[in-house]
């Protein structure tokens, strides 16, 4: 089954404790992206990757890091999480480097930073 | 600044009562306008892509249209299972960034 998986689905952590949210897709997609979703603000793009070893900032990259060492994986790293990073996070992928095609979204990771 | 605005924020309909959702965009050199459906606790699910003004696409009770400044999602004779949040998104000129609107929450009562 074609899908995007994220782990963990739920995470409660404390300020300053480094964490990684994993994202993996099995569709051989070039383009992958991370979003955060907050009430009233909709989905905001954090980082995106056009292909292996090629990443760029979205609209809200502060406090986040990403890497794309393999085509199928695109982990999101929070080096020193803060309460304002409490949010619902989605990973997405699409075919083609230009991201002109539909995006397939993962099930989401609900993060709470205390 | 690129921006996507959706209205209304929430819409309550009776089953069978047709209506439209609006998506206004200010994106320099639009490369694609997307509609997604999001159910509670799930990731968005793709519905339509529109590329040029005048384009229309249909799927069951949904029809999406595009002008140079807006897109509309028309819902004909909705059913309770159409209840969801509908998201509009625009791709910028470069084609790499995606700007989402805040969404319209649709409630359809039987």
Image: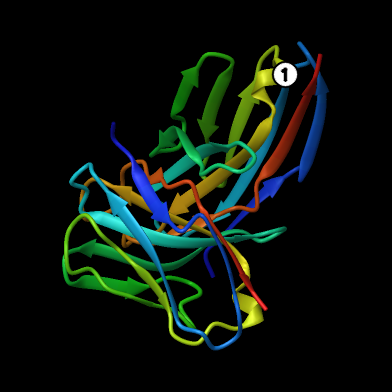
B16 lies left or right of A54: right
Q: Is residue B95 visible?
A: no
Viewer-proximal residue among A63 and B29:
A63
Q: Residue at x 61, y 81 (%)?
A: A14
Where is residue B90 drawn, in percent x and y?
47, 51
Q: Residue at x 51, y 85 (%)?
A: A17
Number of numbered tags placed on the structure image:
1
A8 lies left or right of B79: left
Viewer-proximal residue among B64 and B12:
B12
Q: Quadrant of residue B95?
A: bottom left
Where is residue B40 drawn, in percent x and y?
64, 40
Residue for badge 1:
B80
Q: Is residue A79 placed above or below A12 in the rendered structure?
A: below
Q: Crowding at label 1, few (<14), some or many (≥20) Cα neighbours within 10 Å?
A: some
Q: Residue at x 69, y 42 (%)?
A: B104
Instruction: Indicate the chain on which mark 1 is placed.
Output: B
Q: Is residue B43 visible?
A: yes
Q: Quadrant of residue A112?
A: bottom right
Quarter occupied by the C terminus of chain B = top right
B55 lies left or right of B42: left
Q: Is residue A28 placed above or below A23 in the rendered structure?
A: above
A113 lies left or right of B1: right
Q: Secondary structure at mark 1?
A: helix
Where is residue B18 drawn, in percent x and y?
74, 17
Q: Residue at x 61, y 38 (%)?
A: B86
């Amino acid at each position: 089954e074609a899908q995007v998986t994220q782990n963990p689905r739920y995470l409660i952590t404390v300020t300053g404790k480094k964490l990684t949210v994993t994202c993996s897709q099995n569709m051989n997609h070039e383009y992958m992206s991370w979003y955060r979703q907050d009430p009233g603000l909709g989905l905001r793009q954090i980082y995106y990757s056009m292909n292996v070893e090629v990443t760029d900032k979205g609209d809200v990259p502060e406090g986040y890091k990403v890497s794309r060492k393999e085509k199928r994986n695109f982990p999101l790293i929070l080096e020193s999480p803060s309460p304002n990073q409490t949010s619902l996070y989605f990973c997405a992928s699409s075919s083609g480097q230009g991201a002109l095609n539909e995006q397939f979204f993962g099930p989401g990771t609900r993060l709470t930073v205390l | 600044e690129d921006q996507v605005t959706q209205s209304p924020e929430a819409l309550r309909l009776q089953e069978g009562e047709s209506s439209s959702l609006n998506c206004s965009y200010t994106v320099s050199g639009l490369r694609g306008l997307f509609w997604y459906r999001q159910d509670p606790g799930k990731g968005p699910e793709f519905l339509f892509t529109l590329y040029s003004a005048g384009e229309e696409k249909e799927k069951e009770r949904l029809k999406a249209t595009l002008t140079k400044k807006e897109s509309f999602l028309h819902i004909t004779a909705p059913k309770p299972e159409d209840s969801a949040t509908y998201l509009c998104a625009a791709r910028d000129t470069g084609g790499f960034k995606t700007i989402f609107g805040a969404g319209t929450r649709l409630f359809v009562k039987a």
